Amino acid sequence: MSESSVHTSPRAASGPARATPAGQEPVRHHDHPTPVLGALGLFTVLLGAALPLVDFFIVNVALPTIDRDLDAGPAMLELVVAGYGLTYAVLLVLGGRLGDMVGRRRLFLIGMAAFGITSLACGLAPDAWTLVGARVAQGAAAALMLPQVLATIQAATRGPRRARAMSLYGATAGLSMVAGQILGGVLVAAAPMASVFGESAGWRSVFLVNVPVVVVGLVLAARAVPETRSDRPAPVDVPGTLLLALSLVTLLAPLTEGRAAGWPLWTWLSLALFPFSAYAFYRVERRADRLGRVPLVPPSLLRLDSLRRGLALVVPFSIGFGGFMFVIAVALQQGLRLGPAEAGLSLAPMALAFFGASLAGPRLVRRYGTRVVTAGGLIQAAGIVVLALTAHYGWQGLGIRGLLPGVAIAGLGQGLQLPVLFRIVLSDVPPEKAGVGGGVMTTTQQAALALGVATLGTLFLALVPGLGMRDALVVTLLAQLVAVALTVGLSLRLPRTVA
């Protein structure tokens, strides 16, 4: 029997239910006492993990055509990006909690179906405001789907199989972020040539391509993903959810919209409110934990050394990654006047190097432990320096060949870091809190990605008028080195071995 044929549905059973401890549902699947995520099931949940991350980055290369076709303007374009990212980040922890309650497979199916419907709405949007509304809904659907991936891996794999699955998840996450811009560039360039939509087909195709992928994913998930849920699901923490949403919105909304909107008063008031809302969230969660309730983000979970130290590295890594992907898309298209396909394909060496490093990661971790993260940070820093020198001395006529060494070295370093960090963060999270742990990690990653776009993107665009595109890119790359240096320094505090 292949691993991919295992189900936990009673209809899939070929024999009677096995006896289980009191209070637990009987398990009715073949010879396995607990849900098992087989090869096909793992592929399916990783497909679900890829979709939200691809869609966060795929619009970067499509923004110029959206602007021309819908007469959107800078502020509206920022909303197309920020509306998705904000909703996605705000609802991720809640999505993890709901999966623990109602079943992760069920919520994965609901979230994936909703993602397909909202992607269709994005692709058919007649105007900019409709596109923004559809992107907000798409972010909410992604927040229902993505936390179930990590939670299912945590609950339905063990030992070496879990280590491999976590490494593949990390590889999928990194590849998706790079592949989003590659795929977006190819689609924007190719779609108008074979579509009734004409010139608008390019940007519409970056959303419509999700629809057939979602259909395939739903069929596979119904067949191959086991149902798991927490044995003691907790009710939704309404005060914690609202305060977490307020904290993220008051930080990310002004940072992502402020520059395009001209930094009006509301942006400063929102930033001033952020520390108070964040402190209120912490106090409410701590009080709920002390009273024996189950808060949205249990402080006891944050006391896990592996989770706390891993998240501390995920933040600077994701800030640098998110900012780099946004800045390089603008610099290549508006600075070097590359077409969307060439701009996207310029990052292909990064994706290939990332994938190769991700595959080698588990073997390297067994031999060298968490020092692999340190080495990855140093290699990434070398790649950024090469890119900065290439841009400074070879800006005129710079293309795919000139960018190849820098992006490949940076991708190699990133591939040695991200999968290992994900594995470290969740290594000690108990299975019954897998949804919450996955939600906390993905929320941290998504918020940091958005923060990177807001901070490094704002820095780059603010420097362009005075320094020009080339020097603004070089300065921004050097600023990213600060985030890489912080990651390297923090990696030295990690325990040498990974569970």
Image: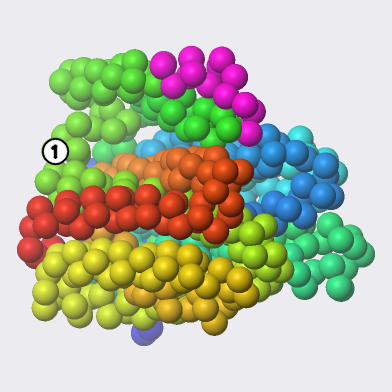
Callout 1, which amino acid? Arg
- The quarter of the image holding the C terminus is bottom left
Determine whether the residue tagged by mark 1 lies in a helix, strand or loop.
loop
Q: How many marks?
A: 1
Q: Which residues are magenta?
A: 260-273
In the visual, does 315 lie left or right of 85? left
Membership of 312 in magenta stretch: no
Task: Specify the color scheme.
Answer: rainbow
Q: Residue furthest left?
A: 496
Indicate the quadrant where residue 416 lies: bottom left
- Against 154, residue 68 (above or below) is above
Q: x and y percent of residue 136 in the render?
A: 62, 38
Indicate the quadrant where residue 26 lies: bottom left
Residue at screen point 25% across, 47% down: 311
Q: x and y percent of residue 356 in the render?
A: 36, 80
Residue at screen point 43% across, 52% down: 475
Residue at screen point 29% across, 33% down: 297
Residue 365 in sight from this viewpoint: yes
Q: How many other residues sit within 10 Å of disc 1, few (<14), some (14-19) or many (≥20)? A: few
Membership of 263 in magenta stretch: yes
In the visual, does 393 lie left or right of 151? right
- Against 184, residue 274 (above or below) is above
Identify the main secondary structure in magenta.
helix
Give the residue at mark 1: 303
Residue 99 in sight from this viewpoint: no
